[in-house]
Image (cartoon, grey):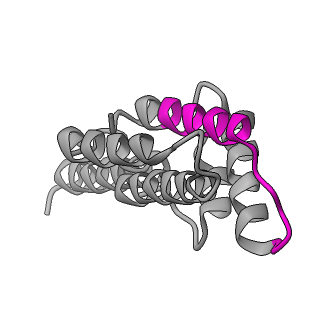
Amino acid sequence: MDGGVVTFIIAIIIVAVLIFIAIGLTGKRGHRFNVEEYQTRFLAIENKLNKDNAATFPLTIINSDKLLDKAMVEMGIPGKTMGDRLKRVGDRFTQLDAVWRAHKLRNMIAHESDFELSYRQAANALSIYKQALKDLGAI
């Protein structure tokens, strides 16, 4: 084989490897969500928050957190847990610190049996999850 042909083949292989590495590092940024499904699911969560029924407060947070985690998994953001995925999400959220606070609130609900959640906390976290889902393009 001619030296120029070998060099050309090697260059093609190197370019292909670099493309695969770039795709792997960026995740599935071009991912298309079923926006209607996510909007319907989030609206159902939002509508269950009832100021006069404290039992709805924690469920709203837990279900919003699950929906955001589902979106991050669907995008291909790596990690075993949502916390792991939040560490790797990069600049996709306009308010990453707020998303972390909402997720930590969810963890307090899930792991502290005596934790009491106010309507204001629930409504605030719900708006944070909504913005995060918008940032990802899910809603």
Comparing 108 with 47, the one in front is 47
Residue 59 sits in quarter: bottom right
For residue 118: magenta?
A: yes
Which residue corresponds to the image point at 81% horizontal and 57% vertical from the top-left? Answer: 116
**For the N terminus, which image quadrant?**
bottom left
Tell me where residue 83 appears, x and y as whole percent.
68, 60
Please tell me whether residue 23 is drawn above or below residue 62 in the rendered image. Answer: above
**For the C terminus, which image quadrant?**
top left
Chief secondary structure of the magenta portion? helix
Q: Is residue 55 left or right of residue 104?
A: left
Please tell me whether residue 52 is drawn above or below residue 13 in the rendered image. Answer: above
Bounds of the magenta segment: 112-132
Tell me where residue 65 appears, x and y as whole percent.
55, 54
For residue 115: magenta?
A: yes
Comparing 1 with 117, the one in front is 117
Q: Is residue 9 left or right of residue 93?
A: left
Residue 67 sits in quarter: bottom left
Please tell me whether residue 96 is drawn above or below residue 61 in the rendered image. Answer: above
User: Which residue is the extreme one toward the top?
Assistant: 94
Tell me where residue 9 appears, x and y as whole percent.
21, 55
User: Which residue is the extreme one toward the front?
Assistant: 52
Comparing 114 with 87, the one in front is 114
Please tell me whether residue 109 is drawn above or below residue 119 in the rendered image. Answer: below
Q: Total number of numbered labels?
A: 0
Comparing 82 with 27, the one in front is 82
Which residue corresponds to the image point at 59% horizontal and 58% vertical from the top-left? Answer: 85
Which residue corresponds to the image point at 60% horizontal and 62% vertical from the top-left? Answer: 82
